[in-house]
Amino acid sequence: MNKEKTIVRGLVVLMSLMGLVGLTNSCSNDEEPAKGHAEASEAPVAEVRSLATYFDEYVARSRAWTYPTYGDSTYTEYENGIQPIGIAFTQNDKAALKGTFSTYTKNGETTWRLIVTDPERSVDEITAGDYYLYGFIPSTSGIILNVTDLDGKDGVGSGASYSTGAKVELNNVPTVMSEDLCVVIGAKDGTGKEAVTGLRRGDFAYNAKTVKGVGEDAMSNFVFLLFDHLYASLRVNMRVQSDYAALRTIKLKALRLSTKAGGETSREYTTITASLKANDGSKSPITGITYEQTGKVIGEDGLTFWWSDDGEALTTSFTERAGNFMPHNISTLVLTSVYDVYDRKGHLTRENCSATNTMALSDLFTEQATTQRGKRYTVNLTIQPTYLYVLSDPDLDSPTVTVE
């Protein structure tokens, strides 16, 4: 198969953190608190910008394929836009201070802030000095971040060594997500929103500076974060067969995915543990990742990663929709498409049709038996009737979805 080759390495978040130190712990009455953190300690953040590397592309179109090689890292904006970031400020022999970088709206303007999520801790604990930053993106509801050093130590007097690396544990992660799940692989303090020296993977050191004054008079802290992918991506290109499009309109309402490792269907949630060892940047700091399945087995219809309440009309040209999934040992993708069928006068003739395509990875990609993190797999789907020219009119409302 033909492979559209781009480079995958990680993700960069350019973050301007203004007023990290010496600011109040609560928002004023006209601020909108983040959900679930109304009582949390917080501080304003000037700006967050996210840049991500490209995915390696695996496109199910032909049978020729060569395993990719990596050159220099290439980064682009994080594909899922502005997302909350789960972060841990750590220092040797101290307990990790966990929080979230998120946005809120005040006076019609979007503003970033750091929320400390532990009710027993305060943002005032982040004073001028050196820290080691570990975390993930996106920080969505229900995902729990735990951080220890590589020996599992954390806390005052524990001897924890965060300067040499950390174990980042993410609990209750959905096995299928619409967003691209990534882990921090590098951090550095900068001198401006787009100015940083020495940012590289394997270096997690960040120097927080004392803030003097408030607002525009304050000295800003700028923190730059590098991320790498924890999940694989599925890109679905869909269209309607041209002859059929002349007779019916198809509105896509949802895409759902379940995955299988061998013959065993995945569970709804995953606990992920990434071991990160500080190094000189010559290789990834990720020394190991474990994926532990939790929760119920995914149902027959799969987990929804894309949806539209009103439905989006498909055309005869391919349009793209994407999701992300836990990649460990996954050999089969089971994709369910949900759509409504209309006649050419706009009358709804069939509602909530569903079509399921079970796709073994080895059938789509030569020499690919199981999926891998940081890889994007593309499939092209066409909605069409089975026998267009012999179908009676009611039969037109029961089309099939085929993989090309």
Image (cartoon, rainbow, N blue to C red):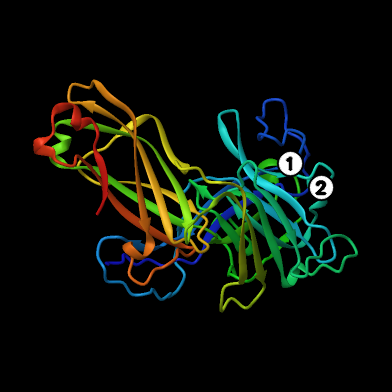
Residue at image location 82% in from the left, 58% down from the top: 95
Q: Point out the image quarter for the C terminus.
A: bottom left
Residue at image location 16% in from the left, 37% down from the top: 244
Circle 1 SS class: strand
What's the residue type where badge 1 is placed?
Answer: Glu
Residues 213 and 250: in front is 250
Would residue 160 appear left or right of 220 to someone viewing this image? right
Would residue 48 appear left or right of 114 to someone viewing this image? left
Cβ atoms at labels 1 and 2 below 8 Å apart? no
Residue 54 appearing in the image: no
Say few, some or many: other residues with alpha carbon within 10 Å of mark 1 (under 14 / 14 to 19 / 20 or more): many
Name the mark on residue 308.
Answer: none
Residues 307 and 180: in front is 307
Task: Identify the residue under disc 1.
Answer: 42
Residue found farthest to the front? 263
Residue at image location 74% in from the left, 41% down from the top: 42
Residue 105 on image: x %, y %: 59, 32
Residue at image location 70% in from the left, 64% down from the top: 167
Residue 248 on image: x %, y %: 19, 31
Residue 178 on image: x %, y %: 48, 46
Circle 2 SS class: helix
The disc, 1 or 2, on the residue closer to the chain's N-terminal end is 1
Would residue 115 appear left or right of 325 to someone viewing this image? right
Is 64 situated above or below 102?
below
Say few, some or many: other residues with alpha carbon within 10 Å of mark 2 (under 14 / 14 to 19 / 20 or more): some
Task: Identify the residue under disc 2.
Answer: 124
Residue 58 appearing in the image: yes
Is 32 situated above or below 277?
above
Residue 129 on image: x %, y %: 78, 61
